[in-house]
Amino acid sequence: MRKYYMDNLRWFAILLLFPFHAAQIWSGGEYSGFYIWSHTNTLLFVFSTAVYPWYMTFLFVLAGISCKYALQKRTNRQFIAERTKKLLIPFIFGLLVLVPVMTYIAELFFNGYTGTYLQQYRLFFTKETDLTGYHGGFTPAHLWFLLYLFIISLAALFIIHLQKKCLPRLRVGSFPYFVIILLFLPEWLFTYILNISGKSLGQFMILFLFGYYILSEEHILQTVKNHRLASLAICILSGSLYTWLYCFENIRSIWMTGLYIFFGWMGIIALLGIGQSKLDFQNSLSNYLTSASFVIYILHMPILVVVGFFVLKLPVNVLGQFSLIILISLIITFLVYEIIKKVPVLRFFLGISRHYP
């Protein structure tokens, strides 16, 4: 039986990217950055800091859970083909077509760039960069998620194949709640493995496997549901402490990394618990957002950056600019999605199934 709350949690997390990335325009400090930037606004800086530790990690956990269900219906070859169409092809297309739009805006905004877009396109592949692209140059931008998920999906498939061959009867037993909480410790350890520009393949890999082997188990999900209020309380307390220390005390240390991981992990299990209790429903809107969410993720960033570039020029206060960027970006992104899904070649390059609502 399909778990609608997981679909709903997924599109919720993706829609949250609109206010999160809009807030990046006003986030500040030595460790921040974005393709356009105004100034530091304390409220928006706090908001983006409080969201970041759990929203992408949560998507990798959901991907691991979905992998468990997918492999019950697909062969390994079918799974690889599906992942290639859904992740690798959209990544390559987005890297070549969408990402240079953002770095062009960054060149204009920060560097006073006066060349043409086509000249910047060549610069995109030749300029020395730190891989963020925040001041121009090559970057995978937000599409790093697609690339990481593709690599992790194939690596996990190999691990699962070995496990089924060597330990065919392996199954996770019932975990008490405190053991589920302590899973943040291996995640913390794996954070230091293949950490590229702050994006750790090791961390996201272990979260994917946690989703596949642990959080896909019904008895563990029930435990998470039963303790959802405790998880939420711990999440809020740890998140408040982390956000205060990061934003106002400017503390950066190995222990802050541990707190960051702990807060993010508690956010994940709190969302899974609350989702089971409150979000296990289906209607026409949820079905539409479920089908649209993947492409919305791909499209939202270049649209938001372009919209933000022009909105920052308006004589409106921060709240007005922030709200306008979110609203206009949402409208344009969904309009573009509606156009794209009617064009077969674009459906192919963006991983849209032939069957859509």
Image: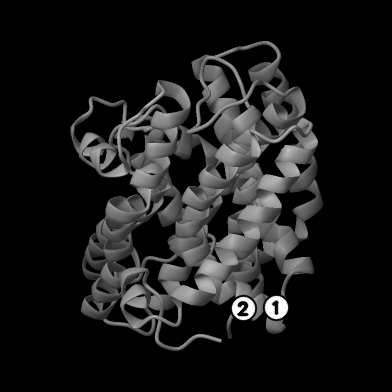
Q: Specify whether residue 238 is in view.
A: no
- In percent of width and height, residue 125 lies at 20, 38
CB of mark 1 within 8 Å of CB of mark 2?
Answer: yes
Mark number for residue 244? none
In this rendering, would 109 be left or right of 131? Answer: right
Residue 263 versus residue 185: which sits nearer the camera?
263
Q: Please state which amino acid type lies under the numbered disc 1.
A: Leu
Q: Residue at x 76, y 60 (%)?
A: 226
Residue 19 versus residue 73: which sits nearer the camera?
19
Mark 2 element type: helix
- In percent of width and height, residue 124 lies at 26, 37
In this rendering, would 73 be left or right of 315? Answer: left
Q: Residue at x 32, y 55 (%)?
A: 97
* Mark 1 vs mark 2, CA separation in Å: 5 Å
Q: How many marks?
A: 2
In the picture shown, does residue 32 fall above or below 249? Answer: below
Q: Please state which amino acid type lies under the numbered disc 2.
A: Tyr
In this rendering, would 133 be left or right of 273? Answer: left
- Disc 2 packing (10 Å; few <14; some 14–19; many ≥20): few
In the picture shown, does residue 336 fall above or below 116? Answer: below
- What coloring was used for the rendering? one colour
- Disc 1 packing (10 Å; few <14; some 14–19; many ≥20): few
Location of residue 11 by image quarter: bottom right
- In percent of width and height, residue 236 lies at 77, 37
Q: Residue at x 75, y 60 (%)?
A: 274
Return the residue at label 1.
285
Return the residue at label 2.
288
Which quarter shows the C terminus?
Answer: bottom right
Which quarter shows the N terminus?
Answer: bottom right
Location of residue 79 by image quarter: bottom left
- In percent of width and height, residue 149 lies at 36, 55
